[in-house]
Every structure is written in structure tokens, then in C-alpha cells.
């Protein structure tokens, strides 16, 4: 058994911003920041389900609370937490096979000097490193799968049509498994978690410029979301930014 992870709060500054999109009357994005516990988690409720926003809020709270109660923060603990939340989501939102709520999940969990990146769906985690913004997650969408197997070009009509069709998501009655990867970050790195209301509207270059423009994570998160809305985004938009102290 390893000792509890040092808190993100001791080494990181965390900022978040979220805006309701023009499509619906309720923001279906949700997030929980537990910097003292080393946990930052984001979710985007599936708009095709009646209770998607509720599922997102429920999932981030359950994930954060469940993991905060554990003493070990490794891949096994994270996978166990995802499985527990998945089981409860199905019991609550897929009664008798009728799916009423489901969601993506993207999280950063501190494990010692490293970060575990957790992803299920099409919310994303990016790493700002040496002036460039690198994707740490892969979208679990039909479009991403078609591009990966060479069945579609990234900008093809087929890819655009299937960009929001999730192949994996939390609350799926058929089961859900997250990708969990481990990263050791440099002192000058920063991490961005976002819903597709941000990264689906802004280009990588635009997000990079905003991430590089200011070292205040709260201001950076706000600028990313405002830029996405100004660029014509109509979906709910949420950004979480983590930067090292110093």
C-alpha cells in the first residue's frame, strides 16, 4: 500500500469556468474541484438523453467523493471508482433498459509526483508543454474510430456527421471502461480539461495562444470559454486549467 497522494493544492493552481450554451435551458456540463484531495473531474451530459445534465452532475460528485475516500490513488483504484460509478449510474438512469441519462467523464488524479488522466467519452485533456498543446486523451466517438482505422478523413462529411456519436460513455447499460494513463509533468507544464463546447469550436492553435497568454488558471479558463462562445459555439462550454505553483 502506498501513502496518500500529495494534494494538487500544494503544487498546482486550479481555475474553472463554464457557460450555458444557446441550445438548452440547463447547463449539462458539470465539474468538481477537490484540490486538497488531488482530484479534478469534468463531465458533459449526453444531450440525447432526457437527464444528461443530472447524470453529469451525479457522476462527477460520485467519482470525486468515492476516490477521495480511498488511501491509494493508482490505476486500480481509479478503475474501481469508475466501475462503481458506472454501476450506480446504470441503476439510476437506465431502469428497465430505458436510458434516461448518460455522460462523459474526464479527470486528473494526483498519485505522488505523477498525474493519472482518466477519460471516457469526448471530453478532453490537453497538456501544454514547450509552447505546444498536446492531446493526452483520445475521443471515444464514431468519427475518431473511423479516422483511426482509415475509413474516413478527419475533415470528411462522414467524420463531421459522426463527431458527436459516442462509442463509449458513462452510464451505458452495455458497460463502460475508461482510459487511464500516467504522466509526469515538467514544472512549466499546464493541463487543460475541456468539454466539446470549447475544443469542438476553437482550433488547437487558438487554445494554445490562450493558454500561453496568461499564467492565471482562472483567467485562462474564462478566456477559453468566452472565446468559444464568441467564435459561434452554441453548446455548453467548460474549461478547467491546472498550472504548477511557482
Image (tube, helix red, strand yellow):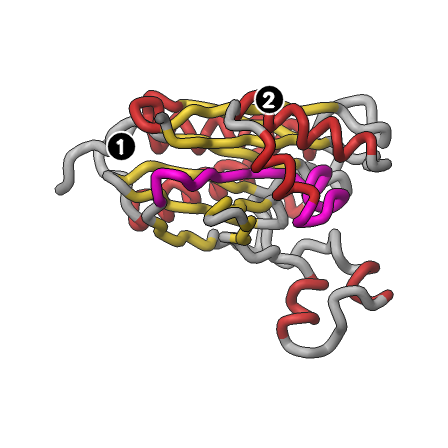
235 shown above or below 150: above
Q: Which residues are magenta?
A: 186-205
Q: Is residue 200 visible?
A: yes
237 or 44: nearer the viewer: 237
Q: Residue at x 67, y 48 (%)?
A: 205
Q: Would you name the residue on which mark 2 appears?
A: 219
SS class of the residue under badge 1?
Answer: loop
Indicate left or right for 204 with 184 as reference: right
Instruction: Point out residue 54 in the picture as x, y percentages from the top left corner.
Output: 64, 27
Indicate left or right for 77 with 29 as reference: left
Quadrant of image for the N terminus: top left
Please state which of the two labelled residues, at mark 2 or mark 1, is closer to the viewer: 2
Place residue 29 in its image quadrant: top right
25 or 144: nearer the viewer: 144
Magenta run includes residue 189: yes
Instruction: Point out residue 191 in the picture as x, y percentages from the top left corner.
Output: 48, 39
Give the crowd class for mark 2: few <14, some 14-19, many >=20 residues within 10 Å. Answer: some
Report the label total.
2
Magenta run includes residue 120: no
Q: Residue at x 65, y 47 (%)?
A: 97
Instruction: Point out residue 243 in the picture as x, y percentages from the top left corner.
Output: 44, 31
Q: Would you name the residue on which mark 1 appears?
A: 70
Place residue 111 in its image quadrant: top left
33 or 183: nearer the viewer: 183
Instruction: Point out residue 11 in the picture as x, y percentages from the top left corner.
Output: 32, 28
Amino acid at each position: 500500500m502506498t501513502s496518500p497522494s500529495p494534494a494538487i493544492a500544494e503544487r498546482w493552481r486550479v481555475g474553472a469556468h463554464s457557460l450555458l450554451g444557446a441550445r438548452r435551458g440547463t447547463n449539462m456540463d458539470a465539474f468538481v474541484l477537490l484540490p486538497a484531495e488531488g482530484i479534478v473531474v469534468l463531465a458533459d451530459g449526453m444531450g440525447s438523453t432526457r437527464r444528461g445534465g443530472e447524470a453529469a452532475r451525479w457522476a462527477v460528485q460520485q467519482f470525486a467523493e468515492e476516490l477521495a475516500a480511498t488511501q491509494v490513488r493508482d490505476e486500480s483504484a481509479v478503475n474501481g471508482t469508475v466501475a462503481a460509478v458506472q454501476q450506480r449510474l446504470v441503476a439510476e438512469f437506465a431502469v428497465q433498459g430505458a436510458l434516461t441519462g448518460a455522460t462523459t467523464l474526464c479527470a486528473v488524479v494526483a498519485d505522488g509526483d505523477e498525474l493519472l488522466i482518466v477519460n471516457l467519452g469526448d471530453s478532453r485533456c490537453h497538456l501544454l508543454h514547450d509552447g505546444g498543446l498536446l492531446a493526452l486523451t483520445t475521443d471515444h466517438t464514431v468519427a475518431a474510430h473511423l479516422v483511426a482505422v482509415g475509413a474516413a478523413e478527419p475533415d470528411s462529411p462522414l467524420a463531421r456527421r459522426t463527431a458527436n456519436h459516442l462509442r463509449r460513455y458513462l452510464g451505458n447499460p452495455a458497460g463502460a471502461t475508461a482510459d487511464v494513463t500516467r504522466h509526469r509533468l515538467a514544472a512549466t507544464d499546464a493541463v487543460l480539461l475541456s468539454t466539446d463546447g470549447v475544443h469542438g469550436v476553437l482550433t488547437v492553435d487558438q487554445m494554445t495562444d490562450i493558454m500561453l497568454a496568461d499564467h492565471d488558471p482562472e483567467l485562462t479558463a474564462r478566456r477559453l470559454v468566452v472565446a468559444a462562445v464568441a467564435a459561434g459555439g452554441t453548446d455548453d462550454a467548460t474549461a478547467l486549467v491546472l498550472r504548477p505553483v511557482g
